[in-house]
Structures are given as C-alpha cells and as structure tokens.
Image (cartoon, coloured by chain):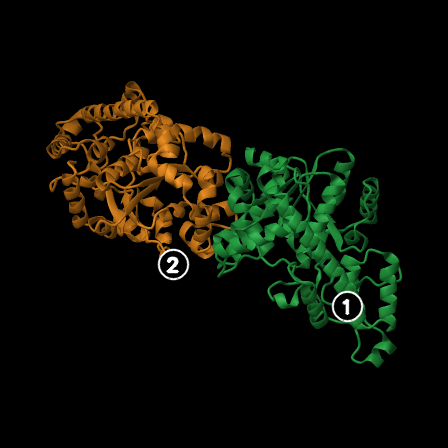
Chain colours: A orange, B green
Amino acid sequence: MTTTVTPWDVEGSVDYDKLIKEFGVQYISDEHYNYLKELAKEKGLEEHIFLKRKLFFAQMDLGKAIQDHKDGKPVFLYTGRAPGGSMHIGHLIPFMFTKYLQDLLDCNLYIQIPDDEKFLFKKDLTLDKIEEMLLSDLDDIAAIGFNPEKTFIFRNTEFMSNMYPLYLQTAKKITFSQARNTFGFENSSNIGQINYPALQIVPTFFEKGQCLIPCAIDQNPYFLLQRDFATKLGYNKNATILSKFLTALTGPNGKMSASDPSKAILLTDEPNQVKKKVNKHAFSGGRETLEEHREKGGDCSIDVAYQWLYNIFEEDEKEIQRIYEQYSSGNMLSGEIKKILIEKINNLLEKHRTQKQEAKENNLLEKYMKTGELAQSMWNKKF
Amino acid sequence: MTTTVTPWDVEGSVDYDKLIKEFGVQYISDEHYNYLKELAKEKGLEEHIFLKRKLFFAQMDLGKAIQDHKDGKPVFLYTGRAPGGSMHIGHLIPFMFTKYLQDLLDCNLYIQIPDDEKFLFKKDLTLDKIEEMLLSDLDDIAAIGFNPEKTFIFRNTEFMSNMYPLYLQTAKKITFSQARNTFGFENSSNIGQINYPALQIVPTFFEKGQCLIPCAIDQNPYFLLQRDFATKLGYNKNATILSKFLTALTGPNGKMSASDPSKAILLTDEPNQVKKKVNKHAFSGGRETLEEHREKGGDCSIDVAYQWLYNIFEEDEKEIQRIYEQYSSGNMLSGEIKKILIEKINNLLEKHRTQKQEAKENNLLEKYMKTGELAQSMWNKKF
C-alpha cells in the first residue's frame, strides 16, 4: 500500500497526530500489528482489515496485554454501547473487531449496556424510550456472533446490585477535580453525570487479569482515568485498542450519526434504501463535470465511497489499489465507485440480517445475558 | 412545666433558633402537638415524652402530613441509619419515635441502611468492616418492634437494582451547584459522595402518598433539597419531623458520639458498666463542694443526668418537676440524680435486650427485610 495515500492522514477535519497527544495514547506499533497478524495465522484467520488499514490505530498498554497473552496470563475484553436504537454501520465496527479479538485471544468478553448513561445526559430522554431502543440494539449486538459461553452482556440498571460494591470502590477513588478535568463537567451538570464515569470504569475490574478495551478513541478518557488508581484497588491498569471515527456518509466531518437516519446506513436498511442513500448522500470526491473528472480524476482523500471501501470492505490489497488508481486517474466515475460500495454494504447487511435471525433462533441473547457459562458465573459472583 | 426551664433553650452550645433559620425549617406548632396528642388518645396511647418535652421540636410540612392523615390520604414514614456498629442511646431516639409514629398513623415505614454512605465518606473504612457493623445494628433496629407487615428495612447495596431507576430520575434533577451549596462538597470530594444525596432522597419516592421523615435536624438538608424537584417527578414534597441532638454524656457539646465507647452508653452495656460510666463521665451541674451545692443548688441547664431524665426518661410531669426543684435547691446531690438516671437507663437497656432476643426468636429481621408484606411487595415492585 505504499503508493496509496491513507485517507485519514490527509483528511482535513481530523488531525490524528493531535488526537493521539490530546488523548494521551500511542500509535499501535508495527510490532503490535505483526504480533496480531502472526496470532491470526496460528488461528487460521486473516489479518483483520481494520488492522491492515489501521482503522484501529492507537492504544494504551496494548503491548502489556499482548505480553500477558504470550505468557499465558488471563486477558479479557470489555466494550459497550449506550442504547441509541437504529444502529448504523459505524456502530458495528467496534463489535465486529471485538469479536475478531475474542476469536484471536479465546477470552472472556464483557459488553456493558449503559442504559443509565443516556438518560442522565439527554435532557428529554425517558427511561421507557431507552428501553425501546435498547431492545433493538441488543438484537443487533447478539447478531455479531460472540462466543456464547464466554460473553456477558449486561444492562447497568439490571446488574447494578451485583456490581455496586465495585462501583463504590471505584467512585471513592475519583475526585470531582479529576472528573471535571477529564469530562468538562460544569456547575449545571447533574450529580448522576458526575458519578457516571465510575460506572463505565467498573467492568475493567470484573477480573483480576488484564483488561483490553476495543473502542473508538473518544471513549479513551474513561480508561485513562482508570489507570490513576487501578493498582491501588489491586487490579491491572486497563489497556485499550482504539479506532478512528468512521467518516459519515455525508462527508469527512466527524462521526457518522444516526440522528438523521436518512443520511446514515442503518442496519435495517433494505438494498434499495442503501442504493438510494449512497447515491444521494455519499460525499463524493468526483469532479463537477464528466470532462473535468476524466481529466483531473477523483479525490480519494475526501471520497466517502473510497474511504469506506478502504477501511471496511475491500480486503484485497490489489483490488483497493486498483480502485484507487482507477478513480484517481479519472477512469472510474463517482457512480461506479458508489456501485462497488453499495454491493459491499448490501452483502454486509444481508449477512447481518441472517446472523440476527440465527441469533434469535438460537436464543443467543439469553445466553449472553443469563444462561451462558460466563453470564451465569457473573450473576453468581460476589465482588 | 411552666416553672421548669427547658434545658435546651438555655444551653449555650446549641442555639436552636439559629438552627431553625439555618436549616430552613419551622418549629412544631402547638396545633401540631395537640393533634398528635389527640390522635394518641384515640389510639389509647400517651403523648410521647419526646413530643411532650419537645425533643422533637422542628418540622417541614408536618401540617400537610397531618392534614393528609386526617383526610384519609396515604402517609408513609421513612428514616434510616448509616451502619456504625455499637449503637448508643442517642441512636435509639429516632427509631423509638418512629415506632410511635407508626403506631399512631398505622402506616408503612421504610428504613434505609446506607451501607454505601459511610464507605464513601470515611477514608479508611472498608466494605467488610461496614458489613460487620451493619449486622450488629440491624439486630438493634429489629428490637424496636416495628409492624412486621408494614416495615421494610433495606440495605442500599442490596436494594440498588430495584431502586436504580428512581435513583436515576432523582440524580438527574440535582445539579452539582445545588449539591455543593447544600453539602459543601469540594474539588477533592469523590464523585460517589457528590452522588450520594440522590440515594438518600430516593426512598421519599417509594410511594405516591405523603412521606414523613422523623430524624435529627442535621439530616434535613437532604430533604429540603428533595422539595426543589419532587413535584416535577410526580411526587409529594417530603415532610420532616426533627429532633434536637441528645446531649453527650460528657457534656452539652454536640451529639453523643460512639467513637469513644467509654464515654457513651452503648446498647450492649451491662448494668454495672452503665453505673460506672454515668458516675464517672456524666457531666454534672453540681457544685464543687457539698457545702456549695447545698447552698447554691445544682445547675439543671448543664447537668446531663437532668437533661436525659427530662428529655428521655421521666415521663411524669410532677416527678420531673420534683427532681428539678430538689436538684436546683441543693437538696438532691449529683450522686443522687445520677442514681435515678442509672436506674432508668438500665431499665431501658434491659427492655431493649429482651426485645432483641424476642425479635431474634421471631425472625423479625427477616420479615422486615424479605418476607413481611411490605418487604415482599417492595422486592417485587417495579419503579
């Protein structure tokens, strides 16, 4: 890929070098990438496209987690999702990658559903509305195909009694100053918001082993804070493996948002809707006129279709290289690159729908939440 | 009692007029006292000494609670105790009075055991230590003799899952400013402390009826805060009925403290220990020499034996008047008034021990916490 410009590096709206510094994290090193690649080979898996294309690009203490795994010490994964309903493709990324890591590491995975968080942070949101969104989300998450005996999905409101003692120990270690400096709380913030960071940190203490958290970089502040006091409580400092934001369909300005469902690819979109949305809303790096496009070529660095193909869909190195060259040179038109993307998206969504159906038929959600081996042990666990 | 000086009014260390203003509450009116007296008569009960002697002296919206009770609308009681172990006589006061109110009003009662609070507020206290103290406290509370079908005693750590949705609604309504202004939080306060007021307020929303809270006046700030937003959540503003602090055995400087058990009367003290403690530590209003005492008389306004007899033990108006006159005139010596007190205390403790034993034999604690009618309905309740 040496001749291909990585779209993220040249993209104007997000400066990842700056983010790395701001968030107090490091880039994933070649050594890390190589180890994960080797591990994949051992397991008969490919290197994941999110690693190959560095969509997951940053980390804290990933080397420690890798070393522990090498040494046969326990490592566990933790991620989560605040209920939002109408999950879009961007929401799938951490879960798809987390499943891959679980396959690689053959380890326990905890998925927090903070059904309390959104309620505390969104003025007009009710608990009933959250309940509704959450049920839809859970079906999508169950479709990912995590190991049913080694995965525990829990809602904060349900698991609170069990994890409350751990919460207390955590909350006691975080001062108002620290929370305010990290999350920017104000005098008008409600006291539940101020308290919330403790709840997101708690699952990093579910086991004594090394916690590794795959998530988008914006969640890292919680886990940076955890490192200030984890060892005082007798646990490991958590490690993270962090993704960039997936560029929104409408252009390279921040995260894809489901707040305007007409402009995001929802997991429930039918093939025709996907086609319409991509053709209508996908921000294009193509030129104004056919002539200009043929002459100057498309601009891959801002073209959402290209970026999505590069980061998520087109695993084949030669093929993504070909698309890059064809589009950049003007041989491939905007409608043509979009057509490739539409097909890839629809394949993914079709697979997701099938897996969602299978998950329902196999009561996977119940296993993740109640009856699986890990779930059962968590409901019986005294912290 | 017109000729007897109420000790609290003249006591130098606590200015109750000032407290009333600071806490934003009102004195209990003659009308309130009279209504409760009439109600007692109807139920075949005496006016409680804590009311007669105005140990319970202040209130918020007590008139509203009384009116609701008159109108046959639901009223419920709520009080609590943070686990401290080694309960002393001062700790019994709100519980004894709460039982009396439950008998008067024949209503539901909720007793919160905030096993989280002390952990968050005391630097070196562990959850294990709290567990130990709490078990001892629960036996003492069960000895009071609340109605087993209408009383629910709950530990926050155990009941958290059930009350969590109510907690969320409460926490969302309290800003950091409000909490800080009320409780004086600082930058170094931990986020669990800042969050805690929501948890103490939650039980005021356990029912839609009128909540009435018997407690010492220092707990009122929580319940003043509740009144800012209760109606927005669809509940009543809570009412309180507030006691003064019981003067410490060692003198009129603040609350009795169990932190030095040698200087407080613990519920576990044997008759001989009580005798020794009172004789050795009870702050005396007697004079330096026998001659001076006979001449000038004892000072009831600072004499702890007199104050305890007045406020807690000697229900008979003529007898307390007699003691006042005899002691003030110098006819009664310090050792003599102490002897009266020692007997009263030992009677109370003997009764308490018997009731504690009976409570154990009848598994009362299990009824209060799990199997009683109210307890069962609370464990099944969806907030």
Above or below, comparing residue A142 to residue A253 in the picture: above
Q: Residue at x 43, y 52 (%)?
A: A170
Q: Position of residue A267 (x, y in %)?
A: 32, 26
Name the residue beneath numbered marker 2.
A232
Quadrant in the picture for residue A365: top left
> Image height check: is A49 above or below B329?
above
User: SS for tag 2?
Assistant: helix
Q: Is residue A337 above or below residue A213?
A: above
- Compared across the picture, whether A295 is left or right of A351 comes to left
Specify the farthest residue to the front: B361
Q: Look at discs 2 and 1 and give the one toward the viewer.
A: 1
Dot 1 falls on which chain?
B
Disc 1 marks a residue whose amino acid type is Lys
Specify whether residue B354 is in view: yes
Could you tell me the amino acid type at mark 2? Lys
Name the element at disc 1.
helix
| Marks 2 and 1 on same chain | no
Q: Position of residue B347 (x, y in %)?
A: 74, 58
Residue that badge 1 annotates: B338
